[in-house]
Image (cartoon, rainbow, N blue to C red):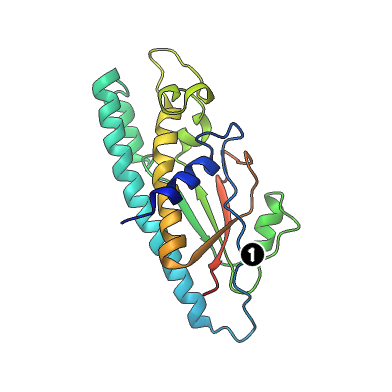
Amino acid sequence: MEINPNELKRIRNEEGLRNPDDVYELTPKRGIEIGSEVKNEQMELLKEDIRNFFAETEKEYQEAFGALIAEYKENKGLPSDKILEYLNDHNLDKPVFTLVEGGEEGLLANYGFEGERLGEGEVLAMFQLPKQLAQFWQKGGTESWGELGEDVGPMIIEWGHFYRELMEVVWEKIGYYESEKGIRFDRINGIGDHDPKLYYYIWKISRWED
């Protein structure tokens, strides 16, 4: 997979590698204006692309997590084999993606986005970090992102390091699907607006206009 280095740099900057408010808003672009004549087949093709995005990102994220944690254990002796076993057994080495099909407006209202509505040709989707990263994303990681990281003791796992390194996988895949697949990720939750128990990103996903 190839992505323009300048585009990846833009995503990193906007996502928060150098942003103290943490994460980004993708540059606003003009999306598709879809009329009532759009066929179900087109929506199914969009959903298929979204599911492919989920599967590819999850796979690459899990592989990157495995490589990072092996390196971290070799260098720092953490985490213990027992913790590693727990992470693997509970799927805490990969993110969770959700394609919402039905009850979208009710879900958004429950999450505090009462005014949000899906337009024609838009699909609601969510991304959540593994539990330990969602909860402890700021712990450690000073080597990855400087003063934005929070120092921790020598026997505490620096989940912030994993968070920052692994978000590269997600941002790069978003950039690829936007530029190569014509998929638009319109983020609903604002900068720094995450719920560790529910979501990291909530998107309205559609296709860009040709």
Check the image and report above or below for 72 versus 187: above
Q: What residue lies at 51% left-to-right and 40% top-to-bottom?
A: 13
Q: Residue furthest front?
A: 6
Residue 25 versus residue 72 in the image, above or below: below
Q: Which corner quadrant of the image does residue 55 belong to?
A: bottom left
Q: Which residue is mark 1?
A: 103
- As drawn, is 7 to the left or to the right of 30? left
Q: In the rendered image of this protein, does residue 31 appear above or below residue 77?
A: below
Q: Label 1's element?
A: loop
Label 1: few (<14), some (14–19) or many (≥20) C-alpha neighbours in 10 Å: few
| The one of 155 and 61 positioned closer to us in this rendering | 61
Q: In this view, which residue lies farthest toward the bottom?
A: 37
Q: Amino acid at mark 1?
A: Gly
Q: Total of numbered circles in the picture?
A: 1
Q: Position of residue 62 (x, y in %)?
A: 33, 44
Which sits in the foreground, 183 or 105? 183
Whole-percent x, y for residue 156 in the image: 41, 18
* Residue farthest toward the left in the current orientation of the protein: 74
Residue 83 position, x and y percent, is 33, 28
Q: Residue placed farthest to the top in the image?
A: 154
156 sits left or right of 109 in the view: left
Q: Position of residue 171 (x, y in %)?
A: 45, 48
Residue at point 42%, 24% (across, down): 158
What residue is shown at x 45% (from left), y 51% (from top)? 7
Residue 20 vertical position relative to residue 97 in the rendered view, above or below: above
Give the residue displayed 26% in from the left and 20% down from the top. 75
Where does the N terminus fall, quadrant-wise? Answer: bottom left
